[in-house]
Image (cartoon, helix red, strand yellow):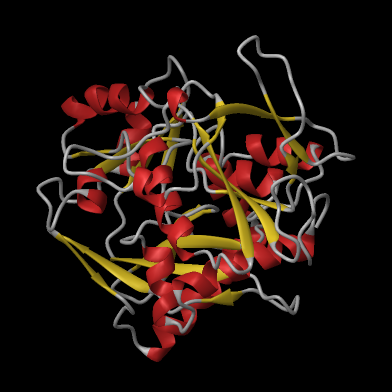
């Protein structure tokens, strides 16, 4: 698809809005992901509009400068309100235009047409169907799953219900809504240890391992700092395996990557935020060392989970592989991390799709599918 010839666009190039940051606790991880995508995009094929969302929800047109999003020794990057021009996206499918705001917040002339958006947002207010709904209202094609799949995958309770309905195994769990506590019957059913997590979070933020019931209230409080709805999961004995799923441009069934294995030796005893992003105590086997039968089983389960949630474009499916080589689905992530250390791009690189080709394929899948029902 040729690019639009809107203001500041280059004829023949695709005009891509790269959307990152956001209001969730995964704001910084989204910024680091955007850093990598900005560096990977072929500027002979793309004109890029970096659109940052600050932690208060302001949309800002930022300079096309990957260095500004590079992690420094003093911390992770973030979107600052002073760094760019405030803009809005009108929910008008006849325009598909971004418009700037002046100091009085009145809308002025359009910045120009956008061909496709890459909503590189993790967590609530971005990966959960909210931004996808806005882009649908604006008639803008976008990378990744639609409104329903994004919302269903983000809410781990409903994700597990849909996976079970598709015949996929998930581990035992309980859900605590605001004001609820875990019953003695559920304690007996789940056993120890359990993992306590926000029902609609990611990047292992707010997750705790509980080895004694006396510590449960503290863990629930930590999870509720991110989400009033909390999931409590029984521990599943097995290897932690992840598998990427990617749509095909020819419209045939989605493709599964070679899986990866996560081997954690962190003090927390599980793959928490520090183990993911700030520790050298985690080892990644990419690809995972699996028997042919286990490899086939993991890949088939990953594709089935992708289709059970009506995902589109991409997803990372996290599973446990038990000692009996049974696959238990843990989570489906519709917008997995794209940082240099993130597993999704690493798995696809091991499968023969390098980072720039992966980004390009995702954008072209979005252009092929367009907005609306898919």
Where on the picture, by quarter, is residue 102?
Answer: top right
Query: x%, y% of residue 228?
Result: 45, 22
Query: x%, y% of residue 100?
Result: 67, 27
Closest to the observer, 38 or 166:
38
| Residue 82 located left or right of residue 301 | left
The residue sitting at the top extreme is 104
Give the residue drawn at x 48%, y 77%: 257
The residue sitting at the right extreme is 94
305 relative to 289, above or below: above
Closest to the observer, 48 or 367:
48
Query: x%, y% of residue 301?
Result: 53, 70
Does residue 209 appear in this view?
yes
354 relative to 191, above or below: below
| Residue 73 located left or right of residue 316 | left
Query: x%, y% of residue 316?
Result: 48, 61
Give the residue drawn at x 44%, y 69%: 243
Give the residue drawn at x 77%, y 28%: 109
The residue sitting at the bottom extreme is 292
| Residue 108 located left or right of residue 154 | right
Does residue 167 appear in this view?
no
Quarter of the image where the C terminus is located: bottom right
Closest to the observer, 22 or 347:
22
| Residue 326 located left or right of residue 208 | right
Closest to the observer, 363 or 337:
363
């Amino acid at each position: 698809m040729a690019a639009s010839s809107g203001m500041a666009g280059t004829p023949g190039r695709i005009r891509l809005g790269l959307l990152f940051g956001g209001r969730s606790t995964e704001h910084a991880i989204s910024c680091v992901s955007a850093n990598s995508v900005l560096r990977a995009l072929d500027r002979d094929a793309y004109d890029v509009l970096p659109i940052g969302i600050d932690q208060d929800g302001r949309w800002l047109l930022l300079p096309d400068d990957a260095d500004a999003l590079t992690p420094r020794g003093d911390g992770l990057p973030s979107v600052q309100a002073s760094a760019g021009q405030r803009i809005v996206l009108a929910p008008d499918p006849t325009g598909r235009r971004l418009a700037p705001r002046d100091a009085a917040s009145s809308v002025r002339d359009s910045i120009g047409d956008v061909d496709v958006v890459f909503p590189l947002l993790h967590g609530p207010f971005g990966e959960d169907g909210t931004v996808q709904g806005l882009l649908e209202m604006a008639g803008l094609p976008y990378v990744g799953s639609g409104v329903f799949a994004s919302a269903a995958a983000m809410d781990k309770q409903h994700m597990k219900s849909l996976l079970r309905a598709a015949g996929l195994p998930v581990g035992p769990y309980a859900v605590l809504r605001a004001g609820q506590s875990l019953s003695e019957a559920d304690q007996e059913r789940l056993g120890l240890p359990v993992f306590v997590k926000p029902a609609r979070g990611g990047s292992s933020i707010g997750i705790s391992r509980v080895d004694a019931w006396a510590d449960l209230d503290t863990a629930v409080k930590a999870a509720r700092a991110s989400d009033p709805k909390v999931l409590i999961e029984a521990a599943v004995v097995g290897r932690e395996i992840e598998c990427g799923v990617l749509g095909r441009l020819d419209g045939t069934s989605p493709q599964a990557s070679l899986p990866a294995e996560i081997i954690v030796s962190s003090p927390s005893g599980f793959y928490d935020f520090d183990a993911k992003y700030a520790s050298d105590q985690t080892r990644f086997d990419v690809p995972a060392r699996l028997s042919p039968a286990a490899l086939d089983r993991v890949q088939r389960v990953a594709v089935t989970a992708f289709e059970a949630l009506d995902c589109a474009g991409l997803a990372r499916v996290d599973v446990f592989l038990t000692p009996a080589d049974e696959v238990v689905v843990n989570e489906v992530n519709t917008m997995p991390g794209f940082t240099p250390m993130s597993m999704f791009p690493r798995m696809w690189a091991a499968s023969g799709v390098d980072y720039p080709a992966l980004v390009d394929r995702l954008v072209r899948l979005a252009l092929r599918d367009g907005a609306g029902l898919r």
